[in-house]
Amino acid sequence: MGDNADALMEQRLRQLEAENWQLMRRVLQLEMLLDVLNEVNAGETLPATLSSVLSVLIGTFGARCGLAIWHDDANAAWRVAANRGVDDAFVDALLQRLPRHPQCDHAADLTCWVEQTLPVCACLQGKRQALGLVALGEKLTGEPFSAEDHAMVKAAMREAATAIENSKLLELSHLKDRFLLNIAHNLTNPLFGIESIVKLLLNGQHGDLTPSQREWLLNVQCGVQQLRMLVDDINQLARINFGRLELQRQPLQIRDVICHTVAAARAHAQSRHITLRVDAPDNLPLVEGDFNCLCQILTNLLSNAVKYSPDKSEVKITARQDAAELIVSVSDKGIGIRKADQKRLFQDFFRADDARIKRIEGTGLGLSITKRLVELHGGRIWAESAFRKGSTFSFSLPLNSGN
């Protein structure tokens, strides 16, 4: 009986490991494509965009070297956008060999010749001609590129080409939303399956676990919970962007929203001896809004303030009237934000390039969702921060017309 239980547990663990690996691959693809689309969105020129995309691909696959070239239509010539360690003689020969007027049907020939030297090559294909090429050298690990790796690179270049051709930020945004919604949908079922298996094993349904097996399963459970947060955030972001989130508006006293949110956050703050201080008069005018959405706005800001604050510090929540609107602010004495990062705080998936921030879990969507929810209420949101000294996030809400 014991042998059968052990065999069943091993089978379950192998199944879980396989499903977890597939899930990680899907998440890797999601992250890479999002990075590529964000670089396309931020790129001012085609060479600059290709250079950034190449950096994303090299980082994703751990390639030893890489090359990005683009077609200069004005001079009917190929130019180097970025060369990361590829032999110059090969690059010169490539530029001479490529056709001066690359048509759509040249794409296969272009990539085939490059792949004789570099293992992965994908064409940035426009509607009428090739816009550029990106190629990767061998992996630093020595591991060969799989068929799935090739497919991921080609998918990234297809999405980049579509975004470049569309050129309008709105089209790019819709493309990202559709892609994200599809990815979130495809991740939901595997996540549910993994969660169920992990729960059964941790509850001892298939026999006792060794300490190392329990630790491994707890790590998997933690990873699944993080992915669940990401999927939930993606779903909400897509609902907002597609206009599917309907606000249940009613006259509200903002102090009620603050007190409700602070009560929910107090236990987490107290665990790190962080004091939550509220300064919101009882006689503030009413605002009109969705109670749950306003609570989420404040929860996101308060959660960030607590996460990035040192132990035994203070987080302050204030509310005040300013002409025809209310201003709500959340201030902390935490790690602060570099000035260069502040203008990107509310972008999708943005996380500051700061080692202290990267050590703390997050999806990079909280502030983006918060901004959209504030704007749905007719308000605005902004941040003031001094690096390593603290931050204040504020948002405004228009007063209720009945005041």
Image (cartoon, grey):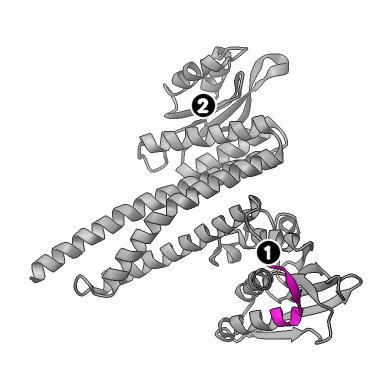
Can residue 47 be seen in the rendering of this structure? no
Labelled disc at residue 87:
2
C-beta proximity under 8 Å, tags 1 and 2: no
310 or 194: nearer the viewer: 194
State which quadrant residue 206 falls in: bottom left
Label 2 sits on a secondary structure element that is loop
Q: Quadrant of the N terminus?
A: bottom left
What residue appears at the point 58 percent right and 38 percent down from the top-left corner?
53
Residue under the image location 47 percent in, 16 percent down = 109
In the picture provided, is 24 more to the left or to the right than 357? Answer: left
Secondary element under disc 1, as helix, strand or loop, is loop
For marks 1 and 2, the one nearer the N-term is: 2
Residue 164 picture quarter: top right
User: Residue at label 1?
Assistant: 247
24 versus 332 height, above or below: above
Instruction: Reply above or below: 173 against 45.
Output: below
